[in-house]
Amino acid sequence: MFNFFVLFLEYILSAMIILLALRFMKKEGAYVALATLIIASNLGVAKLFKLFGIEMTAANMSMGMAFVIYSILTEVYGKEEGKKAVWTGFFAQLAFVLLGLVYTSYLPSQNDFAQSYLSQVFAVTPRIAFASWTAFILSGYTAVWIHHTLKGRTKLWLRNNVATKIGQIVDNLIFVTIAFLGIVDFKTYLQIFITTSIVEFALDYADTWVVYLGVGFLKDEGHDGNFKIAEARD
C-alpha cells in the first residue's frame, strides 16, 4: 500500500511540473517540463518495485506524462509543434546519457565516493539504448499524428486518450521487442509487454484533466485555434 501512495505522489508531482511550467512559462514551459521529466525518468527507470504483485519501474508515471505534453502542444499549435517536442525529448535523453558517460570516464581520485553509483546509473548497453531511443521517437510521432488526425472530429478527451494509448502500445512493443526478444523466452517477452501495457493503460486515464488545464493555460496566452474551453464540460 505504501508503494501505491508513492506512485500517486509521483503522478501528482509529474502533473504539477507540467501545469506550473505551462502556467508561468507558457509554450516554452512545455519544453522545460518535457526535458525535466525525460531526464528524471532516465534516472528512475533503474528503480524496480512491486505493486499488487506486478513488477514496475519508478518512471512509469513521469515518462507517461511526456505523451500529455505531446497532446497539449499538438492540440494548440499543430502537428509540427508536437513533432518538435518529440525531438526535444530525444535530445534531452541523448544529452543526459552522453554527458553521463563522459562524467564516469574521469579517473576518480582516492577521495571520490560517487564513481560506482554513477557508473551504475549510466551503464546503458547499446541494445537497450537503441531500443529506448527508437521506441521514444516512433511512439511520439505516432501519438502526435493520431492526435492531429482526430482534431476537429472528436472531443479533446477522446483524441487524447486514443493517441496516448496507441502511442504507449507502439512504445512498449518496439522497446520490449528490440531489448528482450531473443534474450528471454517468448512467454516472458509477452508477459513483459502485456503487463507493462496494462499498468500504463490503468494509470493513463487519470491524465485527461492535465491536458484540459494545460491547453487552457496556452489558450489564455492568446493563441487562436480550434479548441473551445467549453468542450471540457461535454
Image (cartoon, helix red, strand yellow):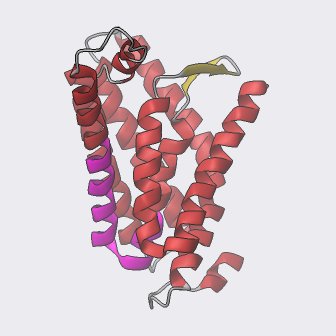
| Residue 72: % across, % down | 47, 68
Where is 220 relative to 146, above or below?
Answer: below
Where is 5 relative to 146, above or below?
Answer: above
Q: Is residue 127 left or right of residue 216?
A: left
| Residue 4: % across, % down | 73, 31
Quadrant for residue 118, please give it: top left
| Residue found 64% across the figure and 41% down from its top | 10
Is-magenta flag for residue 82? yes
Is-magenta flag for residue 13? no
Q: Quadrant where the C terminus lies?
A: bottom right
In the image shown, does 205 or 125 lie closer to the viewer? Answer: 125
Q: For the magenta stretch, what is the residue range?
A: 70-93
| Residue found 49% across the figure and 72% down from its top | 25
Quadrant for residue 129, please give it: top left
| Residue found 22% across the figure and 31% down from its top | 130
Q: Quadrant where the N terminus lies?
A: top right
- The overriding secondary structure of the stretch rendered in magenta is helix
| Res. 77 in view | yes
| Residue 197: % across, % down | 50, 35
